[in-house]
Image (cartoon, rainbow, N blue to C red):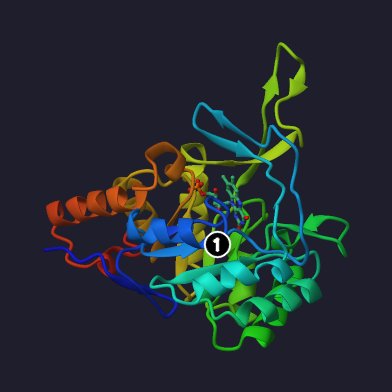
């Protein structure tokens, strides 16, 4: 019998599948369903920012041949407007990862302080968003900017595990991961979406209202596997691997690259809310066939 239960940065997971941020919002009933009906091991909320934001106009999500392209533009209720959600989340029976963003280290710290009051089991910082001080360059491509955010947030949240979510757009993602580890991150999440564009040739215009978007789903899996493989060789903290995981076999691949748990995002679109339990069952089948008793046995197994 193979065992899927594991722990990740202090969280006890019944299986290694985690809902990725931004896929199903911040609503309690929906997040609860992802756990109860969907079978996820843990659930990440949509990133919460310093103020209410509407996000980009439509079209903001389109389906391409091998993935989704989205420019939802980080719509957020703002941390001040979430009293009702937090109240409902108080009695939850599932591990909750809050996700936050800001335009400066100070904004990240403010949002982190407020969100930590509601005791999420972990806090993910989305450093794949633009830094106003650096003229819109994203935090996660710069070692110093990433470090600054991690230490500012860690100061505010103390013992709450901090997960730094990295962008594949970094020149050397392993260097950024190491900088985050040094600054106090307890885990790394990789990867966020890959920048992309799609053009309607008949209209001669980009399809997305925002023109540029983030690619997710099967098309980015090799990029994600490569990033996780490189990060695993440069840090000691655990990795939440994501990007294109659609089947149990994809999840096993990500774990062999070095992930201790796997994020599921676009697969919810392809396979429905049951994606988590389907992927977990497929992982179990592979493990039984290959005589793997515990998922921990194969973390980083692809490293020679
Ligand atoms: C519509 C959409 C919205 C997203 N919103 C967020 C977000 O708010 N914060 C974040 O850190 N990542 C966000 N992401 C990125 C996902 O969490 C994930 O990193 C990415 O989609 C790769 O995983 P996947 O291929 O399984 O979807 C979003 C992705 C999609 C498709």
Q: Quadrant of residue 125?
A: bottom right
Q: Residue furthest left?
A: 1
Q: Residue at x 25, y 68 (%)?
A: 297
Q: Position of residue 266 (x, y in %)?
A: 48, 43
- Of residues 188 and 272, the one drawn nearer to the viewer in this rendering: 272
Left or right: 238, with 69 as reference point:
left
Q: Position of residue 47 (x, y in %)?
A: 63, 61
Q: Residue at x 30, y 47 (%)?
A: 249
Left or right: 152, with 192 as reference point:
right
Q: Position of residue 161 (x, y in %)?
A: 53, 79
User: What kind of element bears circle 1?
Assistant: loop
Q: Is residue 258 visible?
A: no
Q: How many marks?
A: 1
Q: Is residue 115 visible?
A: yes
- Of residues 113 and 182, the one drawn nearer to the viewer in this rendering: 113
Q: Quadrant of residue 134?
A: bottom right
Q: Residue at x 61, y 80 (%)?
A: 116
> Around disc 1, counting alpha carbons within 10 Å, would you say few (fewer than 14), some (14 to 19), or many (20 or more)?
many
Q: Position of residue 178 (x, y in %)?
A: 59, 72
């Amino acid at each position: 019998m193979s065992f899927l239960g594991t722990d990740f940065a202090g969280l006890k997971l019944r299986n290694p599948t985690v809902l990725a941020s931004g896929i199903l919002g911040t609503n309690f009933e929906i997040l609860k369903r992802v756990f109860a009906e969907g079978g996820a091991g843990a659930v990440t909320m949509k990133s919460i920012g310093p103020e209410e934001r509407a996000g980009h106009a439509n079209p903001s999500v389109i389906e391409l041949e091998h993935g989704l392209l989205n420019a939802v533009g980080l719509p957020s209720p703002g941390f001040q407007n979430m009293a009702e959600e937090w109240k409902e989340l108080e009695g939850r029976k599932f591990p909750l990862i809050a996700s936050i963003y800001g335009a400066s280290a100070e904004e990240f710290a403010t949002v982190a302080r407020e969100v930590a009051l509601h005791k999420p089991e972990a806090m993910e910082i989305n450093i794949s968003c633009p830094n106003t001080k650096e003229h819109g360059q994203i935090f996660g491509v710069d070692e110093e900017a990433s470090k600054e955010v991690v230490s500012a947030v860690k100061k505010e949240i103390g013992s709450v595990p901090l997960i730094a979510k990295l962008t594949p757009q970094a020149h050397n993602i392993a260097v950024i991961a190491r900088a985050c580890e040094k600054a106090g991150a307890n885990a790394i999440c990789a990867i966020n979406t890959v920048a992309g564009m799609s053009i309607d040739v008949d209209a001669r215009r980009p399809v997305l209202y925002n023109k540029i978007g983030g690619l997710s789903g099967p098309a980015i899996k090799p990029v994600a596997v490569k990033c996780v493989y490189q990060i695993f060789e440069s840090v000691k903290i655990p990795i939440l691997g994501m990007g294109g995981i659609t089947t149990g076999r994809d999840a096993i691949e990500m774990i062999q690259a070095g992930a201790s748990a796997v994020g599921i995002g676009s697969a919810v679109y392809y396979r429905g809310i049951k994606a988590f339990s389907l992927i977990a069952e497929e992982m179990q089948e592979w493990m039984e066939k290959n005589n793997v008793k515990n998922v921990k046995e194969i973390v980083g197994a692809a490293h020679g």
